[in-house]
Amino acid sequence: MSALPLILVPGLMCDYTVWDPLFPQINASRVCTVVDHGDANSLEQMAIQLLRDAPPKFLLAGHSMGARVVLEVLRLVPERVGGVALLDTGYLPKSSGLAGEEEVRKRFNLLQMAQEKGVRAMAREWVQGMVHPDRLTDQALIERILNMFERKSADIFAKQINALIHRPDGTDVLKSIQVPTLILCGRQDTWSPPSQHEAMQQLAPHATLALVDAAGHMAPMERPREVADAMLLWLSECALRKA
């Protein structure tokens, strides 16, 4: 019996670069596809685009905003998904009141910087809080992140920010998942902290929680071996469930 194909979903302004470091370990025995969100401006639209080219049955792994897209795919066609991995992400809608206003302010400050100074300048600011502090001097890692962001335009950034600001509540989707579920984040992820992932694990009936040491929000790029090891265990569980 052949392994189900794995669809990998990148996050805000990200692309295949997030997943590349994992490929030597995870794609040996299965087809892996990284999607591109194009100019979609809502999570639902991103999910619909993904499904246009998806096989009848598949596994899904999403990072950051990409994991929220995974939840929207599950909302639409849960019967087609054989397993889900949700990395460095969240599930709640934008907060009401001052907290929500502050999130919007921070996001639009970054957008304004991208529009006025360029996406790379914005990415230099953004990356400061997105990797483990010890990795800020890792020039190779930082360059890969900056180059990845620079491949996207400020217009794409605006559309994806709109998608995140208007994100739906994923609580009911998490509660409804009936397939093997990996919930993973960097232990030092300050944007999507471990406490958020612990709450997600409590909601999802078949979830395993993995916290990756010495990693921030970009855990798949910061600690690819550890992330791949956790994903391989999840993939094994998905294969057992399929059998």
Image: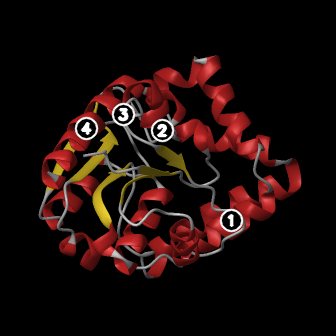
Marks 4 and 2 sit apart, C-alpha to C-alpha, by 13 Å
Q: Position of residue 108 (x, y in %)?
A: 68, 65
In whole angstroms, how far apart are the C-alphas of marks 1 and 2?
Answer: 21 Å
Callout 3 environment at 10 Å: few (<14), some (14 to 19), or many (20+)? few
Of the residues shown, which amino acid type is indicated by label 2? Answer: Met
For residue 145, which quarter of the picture? Answer: top right
What amino acid is at disc 4? Answer: Leu
Residue at point 19% right, 73% down? 175
Horizontal and vertical percent position of residue 182: 25, 49
Numbered disc in front, either 4 or 1? 4
The residue where tag 1 is placed is: 108
Q: Earlier in the sequence, mark 1 or mark 2?
A: 1
Q: Quadrant of residue 234?
A: top left
- Residue drawn at the location 36% of the way across and 33% of the way down: 29
As measured in the structure, the alpha-carbon distance from the residue carrying label 1 to the one carrying label 3 is 42 Å
Disc 2 on helix, strand or loop?
loop
Kindly identify which residue carries mark 2. Answer: 218
Q: Is residue 79 left or right of residue 31?
A: left
Q: Return the x and y of residue 72 as percentages of the image width and height.
A: 42, 73
Q: Say which label, 4 or 2, has the lower sequence index.
A: 4
**Residue holding disc 4:** 211
- Say if 163 sits above or below 239 in the image: below
Q: Identify which amino acid the numbered label 1 is placed on.
A: Phe
* Residue at the spot of label 3: 29
Query: Which tag is nearer the camera, tag 1 or tag 3?
Result: 3
Look at the numbered discs 1 and 3 and tell me whether their residues touch, using CB distance below 8 Å.
Answer: no
CB under 8 Å between discs 1 and 2: no
